[in-house]
Structure formats: C-alpha cells, structure tokens
Amino acid sequence: MTREEASIRIEQLSSEINNHNYRYYQLADPLISDQQFDVLLKELQELEKAYPEFLSPNSPTQRVGGTITKEFQSFPHRYPMLSLDNTYSEAELRDFDNRVARLLQEPFEYVCELKIDGVSISLTYSDGNLTRALTRGDGVRGDDVTDNIRTIASIPVKLKPGSYPDDFEVRGEVFMPRAGFRKMNAEREDEGEMPFANPRNATSGTLKTLDSRQVARRPLDAFVYYLLGEKVTGNSHYERLQLLKSWGFKVSDLMVRCSGIEQVIEFINEIDTARATLDFDIDGVVIKVNSTEQQQKLGFTSKSPRWSIAYKFKAEEAITKLVSIDYQVGRTGAVTPVANLEPVFLAGTTVKRATLHNADVISALDIRVGDTVIVEKGGEIIPKITAVVKGARPADSKETRFVEACPECASRLIRNEGEAAWYCPNESGCPPQIKGKLVHFIGRRAMNIESLGEGKIEILFDNGLVRSLADLYALDAGSLTGIEKVLSSADGKEKRISFREKTVANILAGIDKSKNTGFEKVLFALGIRFVGETVAKKLAVHFRSIEALGKATYEELIQVDEIGDKIAGSVLRYFADDANKGLIEKLRGYGLKFEMAEPDTPRGTQLQGKTFVVSGVFSIYTRDGLKSAIEQHGGKVGSSVSSKTNFLIAGENMGPEKRKKAMELGVAIISEEEFTRMLQVDSKEEG
Ligand code: IVH
C-alpha cells in the first residue's frame, strides 16, 4: 500500500466507522455485527500505527464510543467511561495473560464475569442516594438519564444503611431479559408498532425515551460490575462486588475468581455452553485482575484498562446467496421484505429466510437478488443479514426496488411521515389484513376463541365464509359442515381435509361463548391501531361504553392516563369510519358486550364486621360500584387506612401512601379480583 492509498483508506474507514457508531449509539439500529465493527476498527488502528502522520485527533479510534443525543442534558463523567480491549481468540487471551504477568512480576488472580449485552450506565451515589445516572455518551460526557434509570427496579435509589462511602460511582449494564423482551414485542405488534430487533436495541431505545413513564412500563433490568471512587474500600474487585451486593445492588452470581489463565478458559467454555439457557443476552466474558493495587500498577491506556480484557463469543455466521425477496403484508398492512436464501446450516438449524425489516435497511445494505450475503444468528432466534459481499456481485445485478403495490391486493402502498414501513391502505379488502385481524380477534388475550386458530381462520377465509369479524357470528353448522382444505403432501398427492361434526360443534360453541367476553377485551379484539391490551382496558374503564368512547373528543381522550396524541388520533380515525361503526353495530346485534358491566352479586352478609378502604382505579367495578358491593354484603367502607381497617382493595395507580400505611399496620392488601372471590366463595359456603 502506498502512502496515498493509506491516507485514502484511513479517510474511508473513519467515515464508515463514524457512521456505524451513529447507527449503533444514536439510532439503536446497527447494520453490522460487533465483530465486523471490530474488524474495521482494528484495520484503522493498524493503519494509523503504520502512518502516524494521518492520525487525526478526531479519529474514531481516539474516541471510546458514539456521540450524545440532543434531547437529554449532558454532563462530564467524573472518571472517563472507557471501553475494554477485546478479543475473539484464545491465543490473544494468553498474550494478555503474559503481558499482565510481565508487568506485575508477582502472583495475581483474575475475576471472570459475564459480558452483559446491554447498555452501559454510570451511577453516582451521594450519602446513599442515587444522584445521577449517565449514559456512556462519547466516554467523556454522557446523557443524564436519571429519571429513566430510577424506574428500573433492580437499581437502588436509596441504599440500605451500611458502610458505603458518602460519595462513589458504580458502573453497570442495563438490559432487557429475553422473556420480557418477547412479551413486549408481542404487545408492540398487537398495537401495530414495529417490534425491536433484539433486547439490546430495545434497551437502548427505551433509555432514550424522553417520557420516563413509558420507560417504567418496559421490563428493564440491570447488573453492576465496577465500583470506583476515592473513598471506596475493598482491596480487590471481588470484595467490591460483594460490598455492592450488600448495599443492595444486583451483581451477577455467574462469576468466579481464577488463579490462572487455564481456569479463565475453563470458565469461558462453561459459559459458552450455558449461554443459550440464560434469560438475558451476553456477548462474552470479561476478565479482570482482581487486586485493586495491581490494577493501579497496570493502569490504563488512553482507551482501556490494562488490567482487563473482554473475550467475545463469535456470533455464528454463514455465507449464502439471496435468491429472491418476498413482501409480506401484516395485520396492520405494514409490508415487510423477507429474504429467501439458498438454504444454509447455521447454529443448529437450516436457515432459508431472513427478515430485511424495511426499505431503509434494503437501501442501506444495498442488497440485490443474486448477492452473496452473510447471515448471522446472535442471541435471538431470527437470523439476520449483516452484510453483502460486494466483490461477489454478478455484473448484471440490479438495484432492489421496494414494491410499490401491495403484493396481495395490488393497492398502491403509502408511507406515513416519520415511519420506516410502507403500508397497504386497503384495510377491509386486503386478504392478509383481514385474516390478521381475525386471528387477532380470536386470540387468547382478546375474544379467546380456543376452538379456532390461525389454520382454521385460513380455511374459513379461503372458503369465503368470513370476510369480516362479524361474519364469525353468522356461521352455523350448515355453512361449516363439508368445507375443505386441500393440502398437497410431499409426494405430490393432494389431501383434502374437512371439519368433522365434532369440530363444527366445537367451533360454534367457542364462538358462542365468546359473546360473554368483557368490554375491555372486545375493545382490544377490534384491533384499533395502537390500542393494545393495556390501553383498551384504560379506555374501557374510563369511558365505560363504546358509545361514550365513539363520541369522545380529542381533548377527552388525552385526559385518560397513558393516552397521548398517537392513540387519540387512531381512535378518532377508527370511529370516523362508517365501516367500523357498521361492524360494531353488527357485533352488538350478535350479543357482544360494548359496555362495562357491574358484577351482579346477590346481597349477603359475608362481609359483616369488616372494614374496607378502596384506592385506585378498577376494571370490574366502578369505585362507587365497589363501595356499594361492600355495603350490600354487610361491610363498611372507610376513607383512610387505620388500625380499624381490615382490607385495602388496591386498584391501579393506588396512592403509595395508602400502601405504605397498610403495610405498616399489617392491613391485608387485596386486588379487585380477590375481593370478587370473597363474595363468591363465602356465599357458596353459606348457601
Ligand atoms: S467492566 C473499566 N464488566 O462492555 C472497565 N464491562 O467494551 C469497565 N460490559 O462499556 C467495564 N459486561 O458496557 C465490564 N461485566 C462487565 C461487563 C462490561 C458488559 C460492557 C460495558 C463496557 C463494555 C466494554
């Protein structure tokens, strides 16, 4: 390479890396894997070493991370937030060990910990109180996300009394457990929102949310792994972790002290096998010299401590070819491009398809049919295309043009401002949208029609029996008996399956039973965009009937807790559409519930001598309804919690003071459901 070529390549790499940093840190939407990023960074580091005259102070190698988001106030870190030197190879790990041994010239120990794949955070505590939480930012300054961090239950805001210094800093990693991530994504899809690609993106996106109430609803969690400050005691990293634990911090138990590199490698191998069974994503193991005195001796380079290294697990990758791109239409009409790949074996399964997310991802990758591509399977199950091998591109390849018409119904696609997805606007006529709405409607958390499933909905639709939600209730034994689905089996033969008598009876019974479903679930089942399970419940409890909801103005809607501009707009649009009003009238005609019902329990004496206090918002009863139910069963209603109170019935958003008081006085705190059971069980025993 000539000097001039080196200079050009350095320019190129710097801008590429800066762009990846931006995607990773600011957009929470990286295009390449960490591993590929590290390859680029290493190449740049090497070139800068060979041609120091081209090393600019603004080179991405001279910075630790990304840049700062505009919305949050930024503050300098008291101690810069450095990153770790990392490696994917055992040989380099041994080099690290030799280097440490050479520098220390005395025996030493390591501590090995999990490398949590989340978002790093710096927490400052003064006199036992969390005073500030900063993101890493560019390593020198970070964003103040204290309000968001306070919502994470596993991060103490006030420490238990103990021997902590009056001023210290702790570093850790915020992450989203896999189970919570999956649940949250399912809810997002219910609400017609784009799901997050993986738990780390979800975490990073969440921490950048300006409304901390939204953050509080996300299942975030955090581990801490580094204690620092002038007044900190504990002569080893291990001891400090134990101190942190004793002060109420969450420290992962999956860590060990090792007396040599062999034990370190053993731990790495154990974790690599156990990794799939963890409830959160990790991307490696962090190795740290245990003694703090030895850490000091080793010191830091400008970018990372000399006493620590991260061993990163390789994301499993494979190379294959892009055969074609399909466009799938979802329930909300969002069109998702899906890559059809030449089948390739990857991490235990054969991969044939991978999501391409949206048009932006396609153009950023500049991916074309016929391209050789790299697919990766990280912690998540869905494989993703991380890169295109441009050198292997066929000479006649054509740029990918995102479809302009719906592949299902040929409607012209539209794109709303600020959204990445293209939509098919033909809500009531586009088959996958209709089928998707039906599948959502019968779902467990909606109308819960267990006798129908996605497969049966498909058959009903294909036979022309259901075209709208209301058609389900028009089904009868006559129309269902004898309908068929033709399956072509592997040997090319056709197999016809039809509903047996018992299945038909079962389906009809399930549909009939669903008429008893409560209003809040019916409202959710309608599939109004952005109206998920929680929002539907809030709206139902607040407005109590579809009439009232349908008449609500924008101002009235945004009065409701959790309802903002986006949801209000969607509700207004829904009710402005005559087709939707017609649908509701039909469903009402079939006997579905469009009002909140007060439970109708017979009067009784089972609550005689008991005093209740009612607090918060309820969903089965109104507050007044609850009070009269108590009185109708012989109980008394008190206005504040005292030693005379027997039960506190806790609704949503109950005041924290009442809860505290009840806990202090040992008053039983029960839910509305438990209260309802009290009425039922007792009257049966008496009757
Ligand atoms: S120690 C000076 N320990 O990995 C040492 N970092 O590339 C500070 N990370 O920025 C870091 N798990 O976000 C440490 N057990 C662990 C970690 C960990 C995850 C992250 C952290 C850091 C990055 C380093």
Image: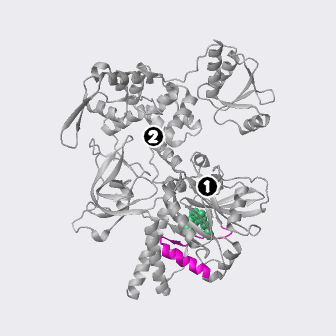
Image spot of residue 122 (x, y percent): 65, 62
Image spot of residue 475 (x, y percent): 33, 22
Picture quarter with ligand 1: bottom right
Check disc 1: other Cα within 10 Å, few if <14, some if 14-19, many if 20+.
many
Read off the magenta span.
Answer: 77-101
Q: Please state which of residues 270 and 558 is positioned toward the viewer in this rendering.
A: 270
Could you tell me which residue is drawn at 49 percent across and 87 percent down? 53
Could you tell me which residue is drawn at 48 percent across and 79 percent down? 45
Q: Quadrant of residue 514?
A: top left
Residue 222 — which label?
A: 1
Q: Is residue 261 left or right of residue 448?
A: right
Marks 2 & 1, CB-CB < 8 Å contact: no
Q: Indicate the amino acid at tag 2.
A: Asp
Q: Is residue 545 above or below residue 63?
A: above
Could you tell me which residue is drawn at 58 percent across and 52 percent down? 210
Check disc 2: other Cα within 10 Å, few if <14, some if 14-19, many if 20+.
many
Residue hosting label 2: 190
Image spot of residue 582 (x, y percent): 39, 25
Find the residue positioned furthest to the right.
Answer: 643
Q: Please state which of residues 354 and 579 is positioned toward the viewer in this rendering.
A: 354
Q: Gap between marks 2 and 1, in whole Å? A: 27 Å
